[in-house]
């Protein structure tokens, strides 16, 4: 495989898998934990304004995850999801150490890194951004 094809494949794999995991986490907050349960958990974890933050986070993770899978408004959603995970890291998981088994930050850190990487490189060739805006990285420059 040539270099551009590898880059296209890598972007697509990273975007779709990260999107799937974010969407799964959002879905879980709505359907398994419920919003009320997520609000209670956020309150117990010390998340400020947990009653308002929980539905926003659940919606961002579900909608943002689907947006990453499709590659639509990719950079915008990727930045928002990276910030979401950094918030979770610093507000909840940092004090528990690295490992997720003890409530640590390994999962939220890798999700933040994946979202940040997608924000930096854009959606890639196989994306709605490419179809809508005619560019693999979309014309929506978040940090430019």
Image: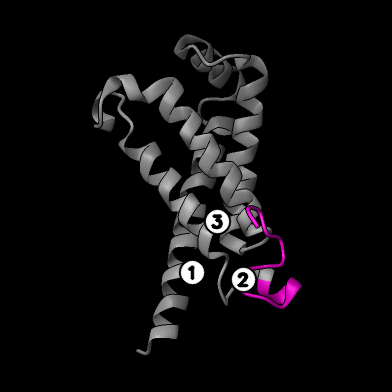
Q: Residue at x 46, y 56 (%)?
A: 117
User: Gap between marks 1 and 2, in whole Å?
Assistant: 8 Å
Extreme right residue here?
132
Mark 1 or 3 closer to N-term? 1
Front residue of 139/37: it is 139
Quadrant for the C terminus in the image: bottom right
Residue ID for mark 2: 127
Given residues 31 and 17, the one toward you in this image is 17
Above/below status of 125 relative to 69: below
In the rendered image, residue 133 lying in the magenta stretch gets the answer: yes
Q: Secondary structure at mark 1?
A: helix
* Label 3 secondary element: helix
Residue 58: name its quadrant.
top right
- Badge 2 local density, few (<14 within 10 Å), some, or many (20+)? many
Q: Which residues are drawn in magenta?
A: 130-144
Query: Residues at badges 1 and 2 in contact (C-beta under 8 Å)?
Result: yes
Query: Left or right: where does residue 104 sit relative to residue 20?
Result: left
Most prominent secondary structure in the magenta stretch? loop
Q: Secondary structure at mark 2?
A: loop
Above/below status of 130 relative to 115: below
Q: Which residue is mark 3?
A: 119
Q: Rounded to the nearest whole Å, what is the CA distance between mark 1 and mark 3?
A: 13 Å
Query: Closer to the N terminus: mark 1 or mark 2?
Result: 1
Q: Residue at the spot x=65%, y=27% of the render?
A: 55
Which quarter of the figure has residue 135? bottom right
User: Which of the labelled discs sits on residue 12, or is there none?
Assistant: 1
């Amino acid at each position: 495989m040539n270099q551009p094809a590898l880059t296209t494949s890598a972007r697509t794999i990273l975007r779709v898998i990260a999107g799937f995991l974010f969407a799964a986490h959002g879905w879980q907050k709505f359907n398994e934990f419920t919003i009320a349960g997520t609000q209670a958990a956020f309150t117990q974890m010390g998340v400020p304004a947990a009653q308002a933050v929980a539905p926003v986070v659940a919606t961002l993770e579900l909608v943002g995850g689907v947006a990453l899978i499709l590659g639509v408004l990719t950079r915008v959603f990727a930045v928002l999801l990276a910030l979401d995970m950094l918030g979770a890291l610093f507000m909840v998981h940092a004090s528990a150490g690295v490992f997720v088994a003890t409530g640590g930050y390994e999962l939220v850190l890798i999700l933040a890194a994946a979202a940040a990487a997608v924000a930096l490189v854009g959606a890639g060739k196989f994306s709605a951004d490419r179809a809508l805006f005619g560019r693999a990285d979309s014309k929506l420059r978040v940090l430019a």
